[in-house]
Image: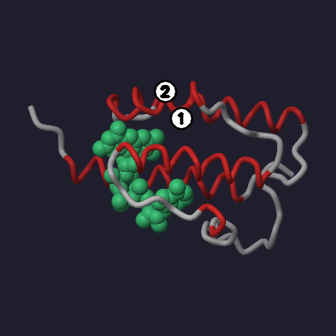
């Protein structure tokens, strides 16, 4: 049976949006526990990602590029990099990671409050 490419692409866009917005809101100076939580979240995101073929591909990317969880900017740059690795494998345009700064806005009305604080 052919997969449903439209549904797969829609899931991907939703997942990437959540993934990058989570990094954009991660603390600048995380506690060790916050860093551990983000690394666990990323590994579980890969393991439980509903498209099995995608999860398999992403696993090899995570093996090559372990999650960077030492700060907000490290996490955001890492997220951009691994998304570009997926873009490459799908022959999509490479995103300019220097523009990641304000691209992912959570729409939260509470200024710069961090979700973990
Ligand atoms: P998407 O790649 O979904 O990107 C959405 C938007 O994010 C773009 O329009 C752009 O504004 C922005 N963006 C693009 N690149 C970056 C970047 N590097 N950093 C930050 N923002 C960026 N599909 C498959 O067919 N096969 C797979 O194996 C596969 N593996 C996947 C693995 C994961 C973990 C995820 C989350 C998705 C995977 N997908 C896979 C789906 C695929 O990556 C796309 O989401 C889908 O094809 C829709 O692509 P799109 O062109 O709309 O843009």
SS of the residue under disc 2: helix
Tell me: is circle 1 under 8 Å from ligand 1. Answer: yes
- Residue at 43% across, 44% down: 86
Q: Where is residue 83 in the image (x, y as percent from the top left)?
A: 51, 48
- Residue at 51% across, 62% down: 95
The residue pinned by badge 2 equals: 59
- Residue at 90% across, 39% down: 31
CA–CA distance in space, label 1 to label 2: 10 Å
Front in this rendered view, residue 52 or 109 = 52
Mark nearer the viewer, 1 or 2: 2
In the rendered image, the vertical position of residue 12 relative to residue 63, given as above or below: below
The residue pinned by badge 1 equals: 45
Q: Position of residue 61 (x, y in %)?
A: 51, 32
In the rendered image, the vertical position of residue 109 relative to residue 87, given as above or below: below
Please state if 36 lies on the left or on the right of 76 as rendered. Answer: right
The quarter in which the N terminus is drawn is top left
């Amino acid at each position: 049976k052919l997969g449903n490419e439209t549904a797969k692409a829609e899931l991907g866009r939703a997942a990437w949006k959540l993934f990058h917005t989570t990094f954009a809101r991660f603390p600048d100076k995380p506690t060790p526990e916050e860093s551990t939580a983000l690394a666990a979240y990323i590994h579980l995101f890969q393991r439980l990602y509903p498209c099995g073929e995608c999860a398999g591909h992403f696993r090899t990317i995570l093996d090559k590029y372990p999650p960077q969880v030492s700060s907000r900017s490290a996490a955001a740059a890492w997220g951009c990099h691994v998304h570009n690795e997926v873009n490459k494998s799908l022959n999509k345009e490479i995103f300019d990671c220097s523009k990641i700064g304000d691209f992912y806005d959570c729409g939260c009305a509470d200024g710069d409050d961090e979700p973990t604080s």
